[in-house]
Image (cartoon, helix red, strand yellow):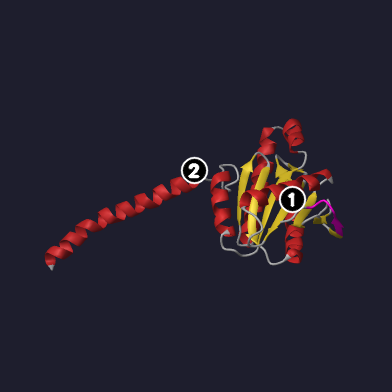
Amino acid sequence: MSHTMTALSAALPLMSGWSVHSLWMRHRIDAARRDPLTGLWTRDPFEDRARKSLAQKCQRAVLVLDLNRFKEINDTLGHAAGDAVIRETGQRLGWWAEEHAGVAGRLGGDEFAAVIPGYGIDKLRVDLFMLTGRLNQPVPFDGHFIEVNASIGAAYYRAGTGDLSTLLRRADEQMYKAKQRGGGWRIAQRLTVAATGTVNGRRDGRRGTTGEAA
């Protein structure tokens, strides 16, 4: 018995060391898969998690968003200001996605994506209204505030209505349509029908005929 206890005592520091090393390695790998500016997942790990979310066969909303006139911010205020806007936008989106039990990522530049559980189009409209209001809050930088305006496209997923690539493409199409209107959001619900939100984030209740099926 004493020999067994002695062996266990000798092994415990080694086991503890391996545990710490394993946690450290996991942290390093996790950090390498996150965008260093925003802390969000980069494209590949985001898409891995998004596919796992869709594989649950529950309703989901796939979002794509980017910032309007972002190049002007970089050109007029400098890249440090642009980085501040990207950082704040990513963090706002990340917190929003976490609140909705979803996942968010930075696809590159000023383009972001997210997947959240969907509980119906009406609920999604409210969610996008709240997200737009959050993203469009001015960003503090160097003693002043930078005005920010986002465009969001969403594709509503039901089992059998498309894979992640298709949903991202549909959301991206709706995002560009929102951008052409000056910002706000659009939801691709079904063939030739899209719900829209106004530039300042208020729901206007209108329906267009340019949306695509989710």
For badge 2, the amino acid type reads: Ala
- Quadrant where the C terminus is found in the figure: bottom right
Q: How many marks?
A: 2
Q: Specify which label sits upstream in the sequence, 1 or 2.
A: 2
| Residue placed under numbered mark 2 in the picture | 32
Is 83 on the left-hand or right-hand side of 185?
A: left
Q: Is residue 148 visible?
A: no
Position in image of residue 113 (x %, y %): 65, 49
Is 2 situated left or right of 157 in this image?
A: left
Disc 1 versus disc 2: distance between alpha carbons?
A: 27 Å
Viewer-side residue, 186 vs 12: 186
Find disc 1 in the rendering and name its residue. Answer: 152
Viewer-nearest residue: 25 or 116: 116
In the rendered view, would you say 57 is above or below 77? below
SS class of the residue under badge 1? strand
Viewer-nearest residue: 114 or 20: 114
In percent of the image, x 75 and y 64: which residue is there?
A: 121
Q: Position of residue 42 (x, y in %)?
A: 57, 45
Q: Outermost residue toward the bottom?
A: 1
> Residue 176's x, y, as percent?
77, 44
Q: Residue shown at 85%/58% (left/top)?
A: 207
**Mark 1 burial class by Cα count in 10 Å: few <14, some 14-19, many 20+:** many
- For label 2, the crowd category at 10 Å Cα-Cα, with few meaning under 14, some 14 to 19 and many 20 or more, is few
Residue drawn at (77%, 38%), measured in percent from left and top? 69
Residue 96 lies in the magenta-colored region:
no
The reply to whether residue 206 is visible in this rendering is yes
Residue 47 is situated, as x and y percent measured from the top left of the image, at 57, 49
Q: Which residues are magenta?
A: 206-211
Would you identify the image quadrant in which residue 190 lies? bottom right
